[in-house]
């Protein structure tokens, strides 16, 4: 059954998100390099099981990949994502919203932790908090996020569930450069994923996550090795 409430929610979120879109005022070129070059420094942010992080860690084990995860940050402790980092001997840090007087203070604390690792690229890999203006002032254009839907459709916390409720036959995943809205920003890559008869949220999300991990590894690697440009028209180019 198509639920009109879900449809309205999705449309509202997409409109809200477009209004808040922050795009660059002039083209910005990140990490223009000629080989031989040091591996790109990646800080990954996680909130959960960290399978996207694991895919990145596995890829980074090959020196030819051109990147290293230098730290993993989280907004909560005791999650599998942090354990994956510890198992790979990657430093971790936790910055919890409840430990700060307000969201701005939390955003600044998160920014300061990330600054201390001097990343070329920040990967929000299942990080379930909105990055605020202070964080994005420091890392806008070099922060990417993955989302389990084909943006601008189905932004928000439940991309797979919302797509299923809407009744789409094809959904997917999106890698984008984080801007100031909800799941908004210049799109770097997308992969389509079919919705199958009998899917529930879990089976669909798992299928999406398989595509999401491959997409993240492929494009983060290309960005690390080749650099990227964010243009004023929201296009991202990787040479
Ligand atoms: C991914 O589907 C991500 O897009 C969404 O949450 C999931 C995180 O999965 N925001 P994992 O923690 O990487 O396993």
Image (tube, grey):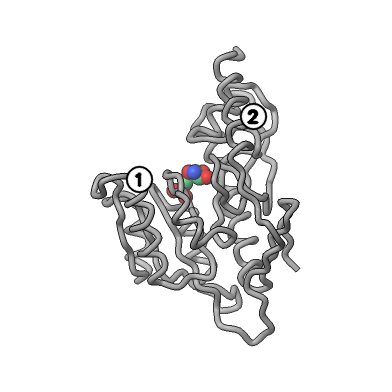
Question: Can you give x and y, in whole percent of width and height, for residue 174 in the image?
Answer: 63, 46
Identify the residue at horizontal 59%, vertical 73% (top origin).
65
From the image, state whether disc 2 or disc 1 is nearer to you. Answer: 1
Q: CA distance from mark 2 to mark 1?
A: 40 Å
Q: Quadrant of the C terminus?
A: bottom right
User: Is 136 placed left or right of 173 in the picture?
Assistant: left
Question: Can you give x and y, in whole percent of width and height, for residue 57 in the image?
Answer: 47, 65
Element under label 1? Answer: helix
Relative to 113, residue 33 above or below: below
Question: Can you give x and y, in whole percent of width and height, for residue 193 in the image?
Answer: 66, 39
User: Is 23 placed left or right of 97 in the picture?
Assistant: right
Element under label 2? Answer: loop
Residue situated in front as seen by the camera: 86 or 175: 175
Find out if the beta carbon at label 2 lies less than 8 Å from the nearest ligand 1 atom.
Answer: no
| Residue 196 image label | 2
Question: Can you give x and y, in whole percent of width and height, for residue 37 in the image?
Answer: 61, 84
Q: Which residue is mark 1?
A: 103
Question: Farthest bottom residue?
Answer: 36
Residue situated in front as seen by the camera: 101 or 10: 101
| Residue 43 image label | none
> In terms of image quadrants, where is residue 11?
top right
> In terms of image quadrants, where is residue 38?
bottom right
Q: Residues within 10 Å of mark 1 (few under 14, many from 20)?
A: some
Residue situated in front as seen by the camera: 179 or 6: 179
Identify the residue at horizontal 45%, vertical 56% (top origin).
135
Q: Quadrant of the N terminus?
A: top right
């Amino acid at each position: 059954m198509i639920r009109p409430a879900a449809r309205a929610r999705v449309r509202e979120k997409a409109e809200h998100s477009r209004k808040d879109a922050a795009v660059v005022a002039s083209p910005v070129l990140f990490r223009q390099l000629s080989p031989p070059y040091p591996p790109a420094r990646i800080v990954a942010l996680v909130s959960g099981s960290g399978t996207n992080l694991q895919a990145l860690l596995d890829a980074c084990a090959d020196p030819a990949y051109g990147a290293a995860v230098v730290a993993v940050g989280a907004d909560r402790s005791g999650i599998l994502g942090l354990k994956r980092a510890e198992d790979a001997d990657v430093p971790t840090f936790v910055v919890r919203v409840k430990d700060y007087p307000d969201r701005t203070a939390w955003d600044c604390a998160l920014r300061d932790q990330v600054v201390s690792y001097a990343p070329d690229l920040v990967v929000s890999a299942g990080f379930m908090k909105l990055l605020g203006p202070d964080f994005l002032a420091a890392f806008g254009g070099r922060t990417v996020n993955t989302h389990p839907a084909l943006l601008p459709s189905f932004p928000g916390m439940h991309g797979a569930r919302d797509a299923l409720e809407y009744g789409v036959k094809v959904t997917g995943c999106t890698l984008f450069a984080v801007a100031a809205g909800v799941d908004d920003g210049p799109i770097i890559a997308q992969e389509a994923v079919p919705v199958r008869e009998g899917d529930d949220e879990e089976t669909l999300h798992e299928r999406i996550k398989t595509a999401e991990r491959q997409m993240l590894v492929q494009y983060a690697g290309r960005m690390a090795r080749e650099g990227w440009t964010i243009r004023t028209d929201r296009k991202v180019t990787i040479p």
